[in-house]
Image (tube, grey):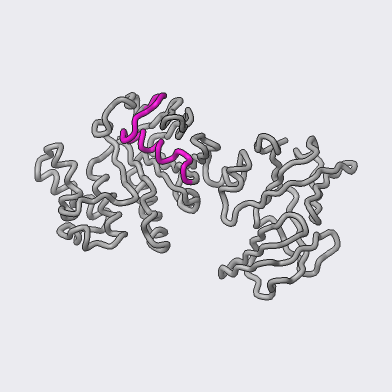
């Protein structure tokens, strides 16, 4: 059964420290929502309040149409998968997966059937008699997933479940969890600080900082339309170039000067109404001109990162430093002087006081 999760003015205080600051959020039935943000932003505390592992200071939690903030976690019909796997070391895989069912006094034949069905989905049928110490990290994570699945919960909760895996296995398990979500059509809430996990897995991302929700949206919408400077700088790898510029009006033209870089923006750009502002542009929307065509700003390459199909450049301009992502380029060298241009319609502008993005 799919259910909706609704958080209303949800808050958590640890003494004078506000860990979660009156957040409001609705996770739709069957949706995979990722809570994303830096360490200490409140994402895990939010998940633990939903799970019933952390008391609520104020606000409401509804799972379906049932208010649960004062209901013990064991009675909420949610299943949580932890970063540490949290397998019982003295039990084999089958016993770990069936533990919750045995507590419910589920008939043995039903336990056997449910465990084997889930094990088949996860490809761990041949591991049922093994102890956790004899499993790899990826196998242990599959067992932890299986233990959650056999409970047939209303909501799956994931607390940075892939953090202990190596890079290749993390990529594999990301795909496996997405496939699992599609197969089960289940409501899932997933916590991570890893934007790659968020961008590749989520139906929607909830970006958090300082206990507050900064923005909610689909991965591409947040990438293209960050609502503030924090989101703009946090989402994207390499991150967005953020720099301060002085604004000059010349007839219909809007010119932005930042060190030796001059940008000419469209006449309708929201920067027109400002004197100074912070600007943002993604590394892929900056172009390097090795011929230093007239109109280009001059920049010096300080570092080069070759990533196979792509090349990442760090450029000094006599003012702000910029990161550029371009197609593979084997000819450039550290210290080279090149031209740099920006795609004007891709330049975002943010208010220097509020940090909010300005729009037309």
Residue displayed at 36% across by 34% down: 50
Left or right: 27, with 355 as reference point: left
Along the line of sight, which residue is nearer the eye, 319 or 138? 319
Q: Residue furthest right?
A: 251
Residue 66, above or below 186: above
Residue 175: x and y, percent? 40, 55
Q: Does the magenta stretch include residue 145?
A: no
Q: Residue 231: horizontal and vertical position, in percent?
A: 58, 43
> Which residue is nearer to you in this view: 200 or 38?
38
Q: Does the magenta stretch include residue 48?
A: yes
For image coordinates 76% across by 67% down, the residue present is 338
* Quadrant including the C terminus: top right
Towards the viewer: 264 or 73: 73
Query: For this rendering, which residue is in front, 357 or 177?
Result: 357
Residue 137 against residue 221 in the figure, above or below = below
**Residue that appears at 49% across and 42% down:** 205
Which stretch did the figure color magenta?
Answer: 39-61
Left or right: where 60 falls relative to 217: left
Q: Extreme front residue here?
A: 16
Q: Where is residue 105 in the image (x, y as percent from the top left)?
A: 11, 38
Query: Number of labelled discs?
Result: 0
Q: Is residue 2 visible?
A: no
| As drawn, 133 above or below 353 | below
Residue 255 visible to the viewer: yes
The answer to whether 120 appears left or right of 244 in the picture is left
Q: Give the residue drawn at x 59%, y 70%.
A: 306
Q: Quadrant of the N terminus?
A: top left
């Amino acid at each position: 059964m799919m259910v909706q999760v609704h958080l209303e003015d949800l808050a958590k205080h640890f003494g004078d420290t506000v860990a979660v600051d009156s957040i409001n959020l609705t996770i739709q039935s069957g949706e995979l929502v990722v809570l994303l943000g830096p360490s200490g932003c409140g994402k895990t505390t939010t998940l633990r309040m939903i799970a019933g592992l952390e008391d609520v200071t104020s606000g409401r939690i509804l799972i379906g149409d049932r208010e649960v903030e004062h209901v013990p976690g064991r009675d909420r019909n949610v299943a949580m998968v932890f970063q540490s796997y949290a397998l019982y070391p003295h039990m084999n895989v089958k016993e770990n997966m069936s533990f919750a069912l045995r507590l419910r006094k589920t008939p043995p034949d039903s336990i056997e059937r449910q465990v084997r069905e889930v094990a088949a989905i996860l490809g761990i049928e041949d591991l049922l008699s093994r102890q956790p110490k004899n499993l790899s990290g990826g196998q242990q994570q599959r067992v932890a997933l299986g233990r959650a699945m056999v409970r047939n919960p209303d909501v799956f909760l994931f607390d940075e479940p892939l953090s202990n895996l190596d890079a290749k296995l993390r990529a594999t398990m990301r795909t496996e969890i997405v496939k699992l979500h599609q197969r089960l059509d289940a409501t899932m809430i997933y916590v991570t600080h890893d934007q790659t996990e968020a961008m590749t897995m989520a139906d929607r991302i909830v970006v958090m900082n300082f206990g507050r929700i900064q923005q909610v949206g689909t991965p591409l919408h947040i990438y293209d339309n960050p609502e503030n400077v924090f989101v703009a700088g946090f989402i994207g790898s390499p991150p967005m170039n953020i720099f301060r510029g002085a604004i000059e009006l010349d007839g219909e033209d809007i010119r932005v000067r930042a060190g030796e870089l001059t940008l000419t923006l469209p006449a309708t750009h929201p920067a027109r109404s400002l004197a100074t502002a912070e600007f943002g542009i993604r590394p892929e929307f900056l172009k390097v001109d090795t011929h230093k065509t007239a109109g280009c700003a001059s920049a010096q390459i300080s570092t080069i990162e070759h990533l196979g199909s792509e090349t990442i450049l760090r450029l000094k301009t006599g003012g702000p430093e910029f990161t550029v992502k371009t197609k593979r380029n084997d000819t450039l060298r550290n210290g080279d002087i090149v031209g740099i241009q920006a795609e004007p319609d891709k330049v975002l502008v943010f208010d220097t006081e509020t940090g909010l993005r300005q729009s037309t």
